[in-house]
Image: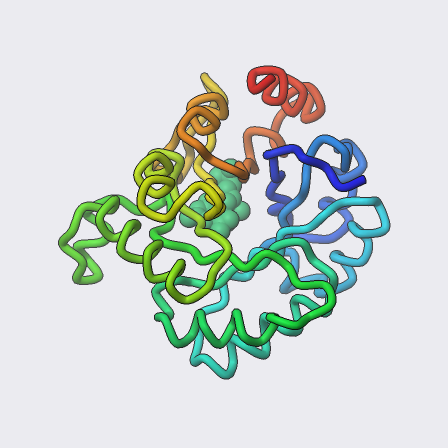
Amino acid sequence: MPTTSPVIVALDYPDQAQALAMADKLDPQKVRVKVGKEIFTRSGPAVVEALHDKGFEIFLDLKFHDIPNTVAGAVRAAADLGIWMVNVHASGGQRMMEAAAEAIANHGQRPQLIAVTVLTSMEAADLAQIGIHDDPAVQVRRLAELAKTAGMDGVVCSAREAPMLKEACGQAFSLVTPGIRPAGSDAGDQRRVLTPLQARDAGVDYMVIGRPITQAAEPTKVVDDILQSLA
Ligand SMILES: O=C(O)c1cc(=O)[nH]c(=O)n1[C@@H]1O[C@H](COP(=O)(O)O)[C@@H](O)[C@H]1O
């Protein structure tokens, strides 16, 4: 049975052995896992296969951003791995996102296709440095509306933007939010953060949580505490 949990644990590790050791402490009925750039660059599809063998549904977080033809091919290759979710950068533009959607439209194992809006590590000053002088929320909404028009299933954003986006893009448009920090945990490099309960109340569908779980002395307990706070 696939899990209905909103929690996705980010397995940000330098190698497969460490990622799989953490996965062994997690329950595929309680969480999904995210495979990101670092571990995929080192271990490739083998880590995806190993996590599938352990029963996990996988968010393959490679944030594709390239010309439409290249992104279409990459998203198709991701779908061939049998993953549950994959993402692209919305700032790649409407034609790029449409090419990605088209590439997997008739795929037998079509994953959810999600677009990253503004990274949760970015605030207004970071956007200004790349020539965007709007508030992050304005840019997030602009990219989310573009992603919806292009046929994406949802977006990655901060939980702070969730109420606005559910209103703008509809309840069925999935919101995936990193930058989640249980009360008292360190924000690290994240800027636009909320707790799991605040995120759920804001309308978030899936919460990506990395270091608060993976660097905890008792990761299982942190997961259980998060799930309990949402019960
Ligand atoms: O697409 C993502 O998952 C993502 C988008 C974003 O805007 N911000 C963000 O932090 N992420 C990822 O979410 C995870 C957050 O991890 P922690 O900050 O350790 O909880 C990392 O794997 C990031 O790569």
Q: Residue at x 48, y 27 (%)?
A: 200
> Which residue reaches farthest left?
133
Q: Quadrant of the N terminus?
A: top right
Residue 83's image quarter?
bottom right
**Which of the pair 137/42 is nearer the observer?**
137
The image shows residue 79, relative to residue 122, as above or below, that is below
Please state the horizontal and vertical placement of residue 229, each as a whole percent of the image.
Answer: 56, 16
> Which residue reaches farthest bottom?
69
Please state the horizontal and vertical placement of residue 98, each as a whole percent of the image.
Answer: 45, 73
The colour scheme is rainbow
Please state the horizontal and vertical placement of residue 158, each as a whole percent of the image.
Answer: 38, 40
The answer to whether residue 52 of the structure is visible from this angle is yes
Please state the horizontal and vertical placement of residue 134, each as a whole percent of the image.
Answer: 16, 51
Q: Is residue 168 left or right of residue 111?
A: left
**Which of the pair 186/123 is nearer the observer?**
123
**Which of the pair 21/79 is nearer the observer?**
79
Residue 28's image quarter?
top right
**Which of the pair 98/82 is nearer the observer?**
98
Q: Is residue 21 left or right of residue 155?
A: right
The image shows residue 92, relative to residue 211, as above or below, that is below
Q: Residue at x 37, y 44 (%)?
A: 120
Q: Residue at x 41, y 66 (%)?
A: 150
Q: Quadrant of the C terminus?
A: top right
Residue 115's image quarter?
bottom left
The image shows residue 187, relative to residue 174, as above or below, that is above
Q: Is residue 119 left or right of residue 185?
A: left
